Amino acid sequence: MYKHVHIALKTLGGKVSLGAAPKLLNIPKNWLHQGLSYMDRTEFFVRVFVEIAEMLFMVNILSYVLQVNILNWLLIVMSFMIVHTVNWMLNGNWWALAMFTFPGLRNAGEKATCKYLSRMADRLRASRAIAALAIYGSVARGKWHDKSDLDIRILRNKGLLNGLAAAAITMRERAIAFFSGQPIDLFLADSAEFLGRMSVDEKPVILLKRGAYAAHALQGEEEVLVDFRPAR
């Protein structure tokens, strides 16, 4: 049974106040770690494997183009910088970083955000690797505003293949958010323990919940439909 939910804009707030100076130190710090220390195990190992594979590919490409030895240390550093930067933009929470670094930036707005969430739920519903999709943070607290990001957690089903598929879906969703201009804080959860890292006073908004694994991890939480029509 679905519950119908509408997200409404609240009083302006955020991690960087209006009129404040840009917090440029956020950028190199975020570029360096890219949330790796926070990731659950499956997402962490897939992300590291993908970046290593991409880096080896880039080393070979640059070695051929520049006609230098493949073991040249400058070539290796250059390959790492390129690959890590591309992943930072396409497979990171890039717009959230930008919004919290530069006070003048806002999220995409109520209508676009609700439409994005609705379509994301539809995309994830198409994969049996995904057990649940939950939103925490300001949305869960009923205090979402135009400086808010979306604290999203995807719970995967058990099994190696489900883990690999869910990690790929998570990377796809980050890329979609990047091209959509959506500030998100998105991570893949292997278990209920990872979801337990979120604040205990936040009752998540559940956009997808199916199967016994999700029922156990999100006991008592209802699946909802997001209304992407702005309030009049």
Image (cartoon, rainbow, N blue to C red):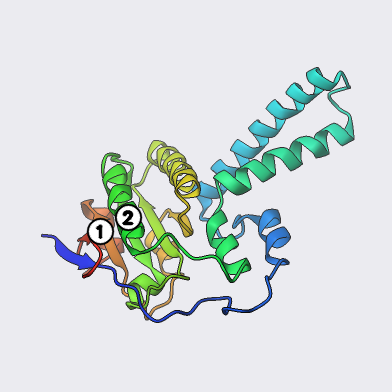
Secondary element at tag 2? helix
Which quarter of the rendered picture does the N terminus lie within? bottom left
Location of mark 2 (residue)? 117
Residue 92 in the image, given as x and y percentages of width and height: 56, 51
Q: Looking at the picture, does residue 23 appear above or below residue 158?
A: below
What's the residue at 68%, 70% (across, down)?
A: 23
Quick check: 68 left or right of 172?
right
Quick check: 107 left or right of 17?
left
- The amino acid type found where label 1 is placed reads Phe
- Depth order, front residue of 138/146: 146
Residue 191 in the image, given as x and y percentages of width and height: 39, 57
Location of mark 1 (residue)? 228
Report the mark closest to the observer, 1 or 2. Answer: 1
Q: Looking at the picture, does residue 116 appear above or below residue 204?
A: above
Which corner quadrant of the image does residue 225 belong to? bottom left
Which corner quadrant of the image does residue 79 belong to? top right
- Depth order, front residue of 228/70: 228
- Depth order, front residue of 202/85: 85
